[in-house]
Image (cartoon, helix red, strand yellow):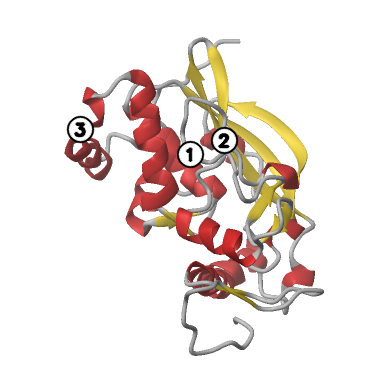
Amino acid sequence: MSHDYLSETPLLDYRVPAIQELIAQRGWTRLSYEDRIGAAYEFVRNDILFGYNADDALPASCVLADGYGQCNTKGTLLMALLRALEIPCRFHGFTIDKGLQRGVVPELIYPLVPRSIIHSWIEVQQDGTWLDLEGFILDQGVLTALQAAFPERDTLCAYGAGTDCLQKPDVAWAGQSTYIQKTGINRDFGVFDNPDAFYATHRQLTGLRGLIYRHIIRHWMNRRVGQMREGVIPVIPGGETHLVPGIAHPHTKEAV
């Protein structure tokens, strides 16, 4: 079977002016192969904040316009940037256990969330091998807040993180695979040439549930992520509200 790891698709719409202008302004085409990967990766990791878009199957240009995203949407943008930079890449689809999202998903609706949630990471070709790129999901602000809230913990599967090395996770680009939600994975769908092929058969945010998510729940979740970035880590059962040392918080009640 032949594969196409460089082409534009409806979701990987890297020829749109916004993406081309970004690449030109940053001067990424003048970089080496490895540095082009790193530049696109670090942009998606930190310039595109962790947050929840209206749908998983959004074009890369829409994710860029939003300025935030989660595993699936940030991954689409990263793939588009990589292909625009002539870096072969492919999509790897999974599901994660919903426990990984506990603390971000409000407790009031947590019981209604499906046990398994669509997840993905990006695989990039370098030196004849495929590297896994997943560590771009949480921006540094969110990650730093979690590290400060749980200074004695290495293992964490909640608040959008799924890692056994919370204090020193492999998230920065260093020419190797990166991960931040890997330990939450509970099903592997395999690799696809592009996200379009995956979402053609794997969709979750549909029907009434999808409508409620798009118009109400995701905004609630994004407010909670914003509070986390400021140092307020929401309560989850069996835990307590954690405040990051050194940040003054006018309100210490549970985040909503």
Q: Position of residue 105 (x, y in %)?
A: 66, 69
Return the residue nearer the eye: 184 or 241: 241
User: Which numbered disc covers residue 27?
Assistant: 3
Q: How many marks?
A: 3
User: Which numbered disc covers residue 123?
Assistant: none
Q: Secondary structure at mark 2?
A: loop
Whether tag 2 and tag 1 are in contact, CB under 8 A, the answer is yes
- Residue 154 against residue 21 in the figure, above or below: below
User: Which numbered disc covers residue 172?
Assistant: 1
* Mark 2 burial class by Cα count in 10 Å: few <14, some 14-19, many 20+: many
Corner quadrant of residue 87:
top left
Whether tag 3 and tag 2 are in contact, CB under 8 A, the answer is no
Of labels 3 and 2, the one closer to you: 2
Is residue 199 visible in this depiction of the protein?
yes
- Residue 223 against residue 140 in the figure, above or below: below
Q: Position of residue 141 (x, y in %)?
A: 46, 60
Q: In the drawing, does residue 47 fall left or right of residue 143?
A: left
Q: Secondary structure at mark 3?
A: loop
* Mark 1 burial class by Cα count in 10 Å: few <14, some 14-19, many 20+: some
Q: Quadrant of the C terminus?
A: bottom right
State the CA–CA distance, disc 3 to disc 2: 24 Å
Which amino acid is tagged 1?
A: Ala
Residue wearing tag 2: 178
Q: Earlier in the sequence, mark 2 or mark 1?
A: 1
* Mark 3 burial class by Cα count in 10 Å: few <14, some 14-19, many 20+: few
Q: Secondary structure at mark 1?
A: loop
Corner quadrant of residue 12:
top left
Q: Position of residue 129 (x, y in %)?
A: 56, 14
Q: Residue at x 67, y 75 (%)?
A: 106
State the CA–CA distance, disc 2 to disc 1: 7 Å
Whether tag 1 and tag 3 are in contact, CB under 8 A, the answer is no
Which amino acid is tagged 3?
A: Gly
